[in-house]
Amino acid sequence: MNRITTKLEEGKKLLSIYFTAGYPALNDTVKIIQDIEKNGVDMIEIGLPFSDPLADGPTIQESSTAALKNGMTTEILFKQLKDIRKSVSIPLIIMGYFNPMLQYGVEAFCKKCQEIGIDGLILPDLPLDVYQDEYEAIFKKYGLINVFLITPQTSNTRIRQIDDASNGFIYMVSSASVTGSKSGFGQEQESYFERIAAMNLKNPQIVGFGIKDEETFQQATKTAKGAIIGSAFIKYLTANGTDKIAEFTKLIR
Amino acid sequence: MNYNADEKGYYGEFGGAFIPEMLYPNVEELRENYLKLMYEDSFQKEFNQLLKDYVGRPSPLYFAKRLSEKHGCKIYLKREDLNHTGAHKINNTIGQILMAQKLGKTRIIAETGAGQHGVATATVCALMGMECIVYMGEIDIARQAPNVARMKMLGAEVRPAKSGSRTLKDATNEAIRDWINNPVDTHYIIGSAIGPHPYPDMVTRFQSVISEEIKWQLKEHEGRENPDYVVACIGGGSNAAGTYHHFLHEPEVGIIAVEAAGKGVNSGESAATSALGKVGIIHGCKTMLMQTTDGQITEPYSISAGLDYPGVGPMHSHLYKSGRAEFYSATDDEAMAAGLELSQLEGIIPAIETGHAFAIFEHKKFKKDDVVVISLSGRGDKDLNTYIDYFKLA
Ligand SMILES: Cc1ncc(COP(=O)(O)O)c(C=O)c1O
């Protein structure tokens, strides 16, 4: 069974961390993944950097630019991850934009993911209809779970469609924003979280965008199955380097 | 073959809407409504009235006698430079501001390269009393200072894009991020025939007034509606789309596109997308774009801010791939020389973007009887500083 599926069946709230591969240094990827797992995190999103990350705020943009400057490429990321399953057992997801995958070749990319032991993909700019018409069969052939996003603006009808098309979890974007831009959750988020919870979707939801500390993690996971931290973790790496990941995760739970 | 967008916004294999879910409601609202709204009688009436009384349409189709003698064919200039605000861009912004009003939007955002689209957007926002925010790359803010001042005078806020190459591509990224952050009250007026469906089709329809007028104007001049060639420069491709539209399915009309070669197609400093690009995804559509083998979008270069873009609209990718259009590219030097020539033979100082279209004569020889219509997409006032530096005019 896919590691994401197994993980989602555990009876606890999940903490997931996003980081940009190749940042702060090109060869930090494996060490960061190992340290994140060691500190009790449940799942990791490995960011494949892109030159024009439309859905990201300044923090992830800057880390992506730096990673590309450091020389990160799709090929290098796959090389770095070649033996990752010898040391890491939590679910690993690659998160990136569609163009680099398209240039690598969608099938070749998926095949490589399976060989490495990647469990899923998050591709914000690969829309639902294109995925279903052209790529779903390939993703499934290589055992990959594709994760779709919903936002406070997504209509209930569309949420149902996305729920039907999903086979792992739904990435619930906390507010109408790019990554890293909101400070704290208010009334608006709470009623959105409750509205989604009341829909009784078949896929669990994991909240992302704007999770940065214990408080926001608690708020998000009151109804949702888990939460993803991205920008806050990258800011932490920028300030503290890669040696103090344990202290970061202690700030969350 | 069909050269227009199909229902899902595809031109052959190009187009579509590759957008993050955050943009889906906005783009979907537009997609569902744009055709219905823009062909309502009241919309058409208001649009045409504004084009006539405010923009000053129809723009003349002018027979350029001296330029024709020089290049040995019959050259007509479609004078978009005489439009209010000095370029074709306003045809689109008038259409989109009306669309925004119909959709109940109160806040307008736009990206701009040369500043022509930014000025055209700031202008219609002033006209309609709407809030206006224009994203512009830091580099372009420096090289198009007069247009920055114009936008400010018109009441718009100009926000610098500081990431990447700090030009048009990055301004577009910032505008898209703004739209993600403000999904309810904001309409994004894209300035070229690019972006997710329905933008390329919508922008083309608003700009198609250019070729609609060429048809009857040429009939008056030459007794026939169809020229032998239509020529336009291509940044994202909106003036070209408008100039070609009514001729795309007239096989006797040759379609010619001129891209910016910068310092030379193979110099590493170029924006000649058809020569250097590969199929990929940029700003929400599948099209030809300049990128690394790894799929990272390359930073383009052109002396003209309006052509300094690493992609072309999906319609143009299809025209290129299908062979319907001939594609050429002109270097900075060729475009500047062509601009000087037009100034001194016809008394018209073109925008540097437009100068690229006039550099076609460096690349293609026409026959004596050929009727060639060139899109004179904009005037050169905004580029005076660049002209002064380049030709040492001061
Ligand atoms: C005068 C003029 N011509 C052409 C262009 C290129 O844009 P497009 O290819 O959309 O016509 C611009 C863009 O700023 C412009 O200002």
Image: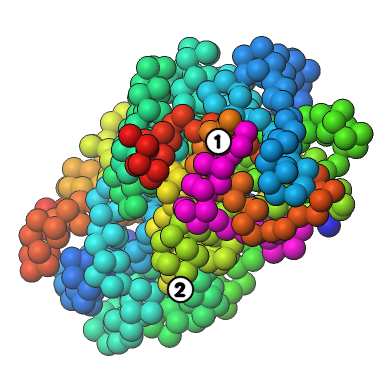
Q: Residue at x 20, y 57 (%)?
A: A234
Q: Is mark 1 within 8 Å of ligand 1?
A: no
User: Which residue type carries mark 2?
Assistant: Thr
Residue of label 2: B293
Quarter of the picture containing the C terminus of chain B is top left
Give the quarter of the image for residue B131.
top left
- In the image, residue B70 lies in the stretch drawn in magenta: no
Can you say whether B111 is above or below B153 in the image?
A: below
Q: Residue at x 53, y 75 (%)?
A: A105
Majority secondary structure in the magenta region: helix
Mark 1 falls within which chain?
B
Quick one: A127 or B79, which is closer to the camera? B79
Residue of label 1: B343
Q: How is the image coloured?
A: rainbow
Quick one: B200 or B239, which is closer to the camera? B239
* Magenta span of residues: B318-346
Which SS class for mark 2? loop
Quarter of the picture containing the N terminus of chain B is bottom right
